[in-house]
Amino acid sequence: MSLRLGVIGLDHLHVFELVQGLLDAGANAATHVADGEFLELYEGWRPDSVAVHPAELLADDRIDVVVTAGIPSQRADVAVAALSAGKHVLSAKPGVTTAPDLQRLRRAVATSGRRWSVLFTERFTNRATSEAIRLARSGAVGHVAHVIGSGPHTLNADERPAWFFDAATSGGILVDLASHQVDQFLAITGDLDAAVTAGSEGNLTHPEHPGFADIGTLCLVASADGGPVVGDHRVDLLSPAGLGTWGDVRLSIVGTEGTLEVRANIDPAGRPGAEHLILVDGEGTRRVDCSAVSLDWAQTLIEDWADGGERLIGQAHTFAVSELTLAARSIATPWGCLLYTSPSPRDRTRSRMPSSA
């Protein structure tokens, strides 16, 4: 019997990507809760999905997985309820927006034995990013020393709902957008004990929304292959309309024997299409053909749910992404005030601060 999924939370377009991926892997979109900004669009797209009350969906033993892309501040409540009902969860990012909610999710996962998954689309649905991480982990550029992740996005303010402009409901730019960059950094280094050393946020374009930030940075320090790795990351909502895509997402991996450069969505040199990867090493500079890279995230995730594996992404990794982004937001200074801070709460036992000598 195919996996049956129920949807609670139709407030972000990512729900269509999550559901479509699972459908392509053989799942059945059985039920949904009739609530959310994109309800009408979803019901037109999936007329076979039955609208039910949340309690009815959660009590239905035939539902294996709950997909949620609701208002970000509500996603943890949905996930905890679904996990407690014995169902796996697939969430759009951010899966959680507060530290107390993250602790609730940890307890729910531990108690239920089910998996809380967040799909980081900038890695799992982009061949160039996936291949760059694989090459870095394989030693193609030697010891990785520095990772630079940039996540520029277009704002399209007129198309955004009110909750998007309030960090209390959206999670804020570091918790939301920078989750992709943190996920990639952890995937490259493999160090789930990475620490946040600095963060900043600013609102440069919309002072009428005091709870909004359109630019943010965070710095991470980790260890890989016995050596330190520094991560510098920036996310923003400042991409101009003339870009031609939703964002010029970039990933640069600097190693002791080479570099990897990803332009995920657009090539500024004018090459058509997306998923551009450039490798520079001792043999020269060349573009890497990523067309054969598999993007079977949904099939892999379904297999992980079935047998408890962690082939796609580990549960501890998903928790670490949320913990680090929440820590970055908690220590973020106003834009332009770049101050050293203490390591994140998850790493108080070892300071990576520069000495005073």
Image (tube, rainbow, N blue to C red):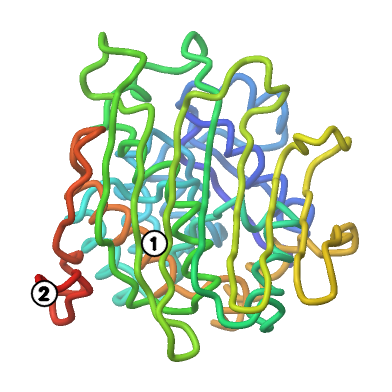
On screen, residue 227 versus residue 39, left or right, reads: left
Secondary-structure class at tag 1: helix
Which residue is under mark 1?
Answer: 321
The amino acid type, in three-letter code, at marker 2 is: Ala
Image location (x, y in percent) of residue 150: 52, 45
Relative vertical location of residue 94 with respect to residue 308 in this rendering, above or below: above
Return the x and y of residue 100 as percentages of the image width and height: 17, 55
Q: Of 221 and 97, which appears nearest the observer? A: 221
Q: Secondary structure at mark 2?
A: loop
Which quadrant would the N terminus be assigned to in this image?
A: bottom right
Q: Which mark is residue 357?
A: 2
Closer to the N terminus: mark 1 or mark 2? 1
Determine whether 298 is above or below 213 in the image. below
At a point 34% along the width and 72% down the height, the residue shown is: 194
Q: Nearer the viewer, mark 1 or mark 2?
A: 2
Q: CA distance from mark 1 to mark 2?
A: 33 Å
Classed neighbour count for the residue bearing mark 1: other residues with Cα under 10 Å, few (<14), some (14–19), many (≥20): many
